Image (cartoon, grey):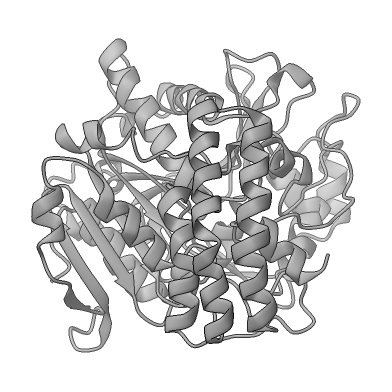
Amino acid sequence: MARLSLALVALAVLSLAHAGASVRVGPAGSYADEKTILAGGYKPIDDRFHVKVLDSVDGDDVTCITPPCDKPLRIAGYFKLDRTYDAHMFFYFFESRKPDTACDACASSRECPCKDPVIVWMTGGPGCSSELAVFYENGPYRINDDLSVTLNPFGWDAMHNTIFVDQPINTGFSFSQNAKDEVFDEKTVAADMVDFLSEFYAKYDKYANNPLFITGESYAGHYVPAVTRGIYDANKESSLGFNLQGFAIGNGLTNPYYQYQQYGNYSFTNGIIDEETYANAQAAIPKCIAEIQTCDNSKENGDCLRAVNTCQGTIVGPILQDAGDINVYDIRKQCGANPLCYDFSNMDKYLAQPQVRYLYNIPSFIQWEACSDKVHTDFMHDWMLNYEPIIPEMLENGIRLMIYAGVEDFICNWMGNYAWVSEMAWTGQDDFNGKDFDEWTGPDGKSIAGEVKSSGPLSFVKVAAAGHMVPMDQPENALKMIYSFTQNTPLV
């Protein structure tokens, strides 16, 4: 797929990968059998990570991928969503690696991780798999060229219990063989994730009282507010009792009305377009935002697709034509021959291995895709909708929010994110807008990691020397940032 086409339609880490990829559902198939793993010549990750297959519980196929399975627990598998026809949501759970001595209340050798916050991560797209994060961003693993896997010292599981989810259904390894489970809107995204978390906590109830944080990047600027609000509302309307404490969005698309107005400013400020292109982009704003507003008011597919075509065609497209061979996720770089701007081919190879599919309990009829064309297309009418209005009530009731942005990202740039955050109406708006940015430093306490400003439950963090995928570009600083947030301690 041509890079320009990607940039015109994608706001994910990757989008529309593997054009023409196989259909995600098909006739019922069996799970990989033991002969497959033996024939595959499986090599353990290292001596600590041998494979142990746990028995299925209540029809949920879950695999432990470290022995012994309580030091720390790492699992991968499916939960069937009860309120659906056939939806099976794939997830990883990585128990916290934080040293036991960090917790004074340890009753046993592995009691501490049970008290660490739970972070749920959703990759954007729409329709991109969270395996991207597991193996290249904030997950515990890195894939080597020989397809062995090593630990990432700055994975967010170093200090948190982390859950990575393939969602919406039919993203990544998640699937349904019933078309009635297809997802087209954030209401269903939220309902599916509340269902998933209910299933998770029912099975792993020792984490149920831990502080819960919902996180994600890119198109998760839609997912994260919707899912967080779904959990927030479920807590009010039922006895589920999720210990929801906060949510974080990295380089997200949340309020297109304000974000599309900043593409020209960001591009011109960073010297990637000339004055004529800048002037044309600014002149296109009134029509673009008028159509975004019409879309957000009517919620009609035709209005919303028209807004996408207008804004992408008159603002984003001309900017990228002038910018030339630029990586839309990191303006310091070029895409070159990579149609997706990054080389994630080792992940494709790793996940295609029979022994890995066996390890993860993947049905034989599922072919993994980094990003689903079908899911992406199904959400195009959702693209220009604004998910900021569901946030203020949560802020007012003590649910904390961190918006963070790598400053080198074009596609969901920090200027656009700061614009909508500044315009958000809540009781702390004036105080937030009246404050200056302060520099924050990396773990060494000396190197400048970016800038931050906060007011009460809201913080906005700029991450220096990072593009769209902050945990990939600045892993150590990203870990400090998220840990500061979950511990409710200031970055400065």
The spot of residue 332 in percent (x, y) is 54, 86
- Residue 20 on image: x %, y %: 90, 51
Question: Which residue corresponds to the image point at 67% horizontal and 23% vertical from the top-left?
Answer: 87
Quadrant (top left/top right/bottom left/bottom right) for the C terminus: bottom left
One can see residue 66 in this view: no
For residue 320, which quarter of the picture? bottom right
State whether residue 176 is above or below residue 308: above
Q: Residue at x 83, y 45 (%)?
A: 367
Identity of the residue drawn at 72% across and 32% down: 175
Q: Position of residue 414 (x, y in %)?
A: 39, 67
Whole-percent x and y of residue 251? 44, 61
Q: Residue at x 56, y 87 (%)?
A: 274
In this view of the protein, which residue sits in the foreground, 79 or 308? 308
Does residue 385 sit above or below 423 in this rendering?
A: above
Name the quadrant containing residue 425: top left
Using the image as rendered, state which of residue 433 and residue 352 is in the foreground: 433
Q: Does residue 345 appear left or right of residue 153 in this picture?
A: right
Q: In which quarter of the view is residue 376 placed?
A: top right
| Visible residue check, residue 165 | yes
